[in-house]
């Protein structure tokens, strides 16, 4: 990368168009002056044009020299890039074009990504152009409005205004609870913490009123957390001293001698996390992932391309070709578990790895086998067909087995 950085520095500092633009401006000034001279004294046109030609030739030579420096710098920078990043032109060939027949899906992914990123006008233009070309993109009409609402609430959260988010969470409380989400409580807890910290100077009335109004709905799932927040009022003076630095802890082992003081630490981190949590739960209720699938696919593809390019060169040198579908002969290391979406499981019966068409199935006894192995063990194809677990004496029906995501 040092060679690339050096060429880039040379390109931006020396091989740029600033000199060329200055010389071109000088040419324009000479032309303007000559035109004015001829307009004032038409008889001197021949002399003026002769002098102009001589001066312009000199200026044009400078412009050509400036352009030559720019092209030389671009050429060296391009060679440095080509030397560092090997070409993967084989993946541009029709033989490797896996999306040639999936343009509608690609356009939909791009439109969805633009909406997720808040670029609504660009997404709208893309949808209009696709429709005008006779290839409408299948995006729900309400999706744009849903994401506009999301970004409106996120803007409020960035300004430390929790009210729009809390109102939305209250309106979707049943759906959030069905998902097992803690979003509504986390929003209310952060609101209480904000009011409590403000109350250290003004008084606890507003925080207490908010707690009485909101926390009763969380008594079943978050009773202990709510109780701790209420009891923090008992130590309000001590916590206030700790927050302002007036009460410095004497015990190094226990730097927070006041109970519940830790509830009011790292508030800025809570604000950052609540925005991510809200986005995740909001998209989850829309049936969408928290992150853009296009972003994840491009990121994972960027990581995988060097490995795939090396595989391509090796197979070409050996005159072989990988023909299996749905798997690769090498492992693709991905940077984070968030890029793993498919089950990786080897069936203990067939000794083969499961696939999308042959997923892992869990039996009521807890043992897991592949679906094809399950069908082979079952005595019949109906849901009531009986089978015996190959690893324990328990029996079950075919319909009682469930697909498991590992």
Image (cartoon, grey):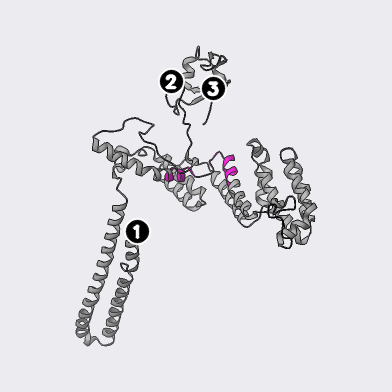
> For the residues marked 1 and 3, what is the alpha-carbon distance in whole angstroms?
54 Å
Q: Is residue 292 magenta?
A: yes
Counting other residues with Cα less than 10 Å from the Cα at mark 1, is it few (<14), some (14-19), or many (20 or more)?
few
Residue 124 or residue 229, whichever sits in front: 229
Counting other residues with Cα less than 10 Å from the Cα at mark 2, is it few (<14), some (14-19), or many (20 or more)?
few
Looking at the rendered structure, which numbered label has been put on residue 350? 2
Where does the image place residue 241, in percent across and percent down from the top left?
A: 74, 60
Tell me the SS state at disc 3. loop
Counting other residues with Cα less than 10 Å from the Cα at mark 3, is it few (<14), some (14-19), or many (20 or more)?
some
Q: Is residue 198 magenta?
A: no
Where does the image place residue 354, in percent across and percent down from the top left?
A: 45, 27
The mark closer to the camera, 2 or 1, is 1
Name the side, left or right, on which 75 lies relative to 288.
Answer: left
Name the side, left or right, on which 4 lies relative to 287.
Answer: left
Where does the image place residue 42, in percent across and percent down from the top left?
A: 24, 86
Stretch of the chain drawn in magenta: 279-299
Res 385 quadrant in image: top right
Going from the N terminus, do you reach mark 1 or mark 3 first? 1
Looking at the rendered structure, which numbered label has been put on residue 2? 1
Name the side, left or right, on which 85 lies relative to 358.
Answer: left
């Amino acid at each position: 990368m040092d060679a690339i950085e050096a060429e880039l520095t040379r390109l931006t500092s020396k091989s740029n168009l600033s000199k060329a633009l200055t010389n071109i401006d000088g040419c324009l000034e000479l032309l303007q002056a000559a035109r004015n001279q001829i307009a004032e004294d038409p008889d001197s046109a021949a002399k003026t044009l002769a002098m102009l030609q001589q001066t312009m030739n000199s200026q044009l030579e400078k412009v050509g020299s400036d352009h030559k420096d720019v092209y030389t710098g671009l050429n060296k920078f391009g060679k440095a890039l080509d030397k560092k990043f090997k070409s993967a032109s084989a993946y541009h060939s029709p033989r490797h074009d896996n999306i040639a027949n999936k343009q509608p899906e690609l356009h939909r992914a791009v439109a969805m990504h633009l909406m997720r990123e808040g670029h609504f006008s660009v997404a709208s233009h893309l949808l209009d152009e696709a429709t005008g070309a006779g290839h409408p993109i299948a995006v729900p009409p309400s999706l744009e409005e849903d994401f506009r609402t999301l970004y409106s609430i996120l803007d409020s959260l960035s300004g430390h205004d929790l009210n729009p988010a809390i109102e939305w969470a209250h309106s979707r409380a049943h759906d959030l609870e069905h998902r097992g989400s803690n979003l509504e409580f986390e929003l209310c807890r952060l609101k209480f913490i904000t009011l409590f910290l403000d109350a250290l100077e003004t008084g606890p009335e507003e925080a207490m009123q908010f707690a009485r109004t909101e926390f009763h709905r969380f008594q079943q799932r978050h009773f202990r957390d709510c109780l701790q927040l209420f009891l923090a009022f008992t130590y309000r003076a001590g916590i206030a001293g700790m927050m302002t630095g007036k009460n410095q802890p004497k015990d190094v082992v226990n730097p927070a001698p006041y109970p519940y003081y830790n509830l009011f630490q790292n508030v800025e981190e809570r604000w950052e996390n609540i925005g991510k949590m809200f986005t995740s739960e909001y998209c989850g209720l829309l049936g969408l992932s928290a992150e853009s699938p296009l972003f994840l696919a491009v990121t994972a593809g960027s990581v995988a391309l060097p490995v795939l390019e090396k595989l391509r060169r090796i197979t070409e040198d050996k005159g072989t070709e990988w023909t299996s579908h749905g798997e690769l002969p090498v492992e693709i290391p991905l940077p984070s578990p968030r890029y793993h979406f498919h089950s990786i499981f080897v069936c203990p019966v067939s000794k083969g790895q499961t696939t999308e068409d042959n997923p892992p199935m869990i039996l009521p006894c807890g043992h897991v086998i592949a679906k094809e192995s399950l069908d082979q063990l079952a005595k019949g194809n109906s849901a009531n067909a009986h089978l015996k677990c190959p690893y324990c004496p328990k029996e079950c029906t075919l319909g009682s087995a469930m697909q498991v995501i590992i």
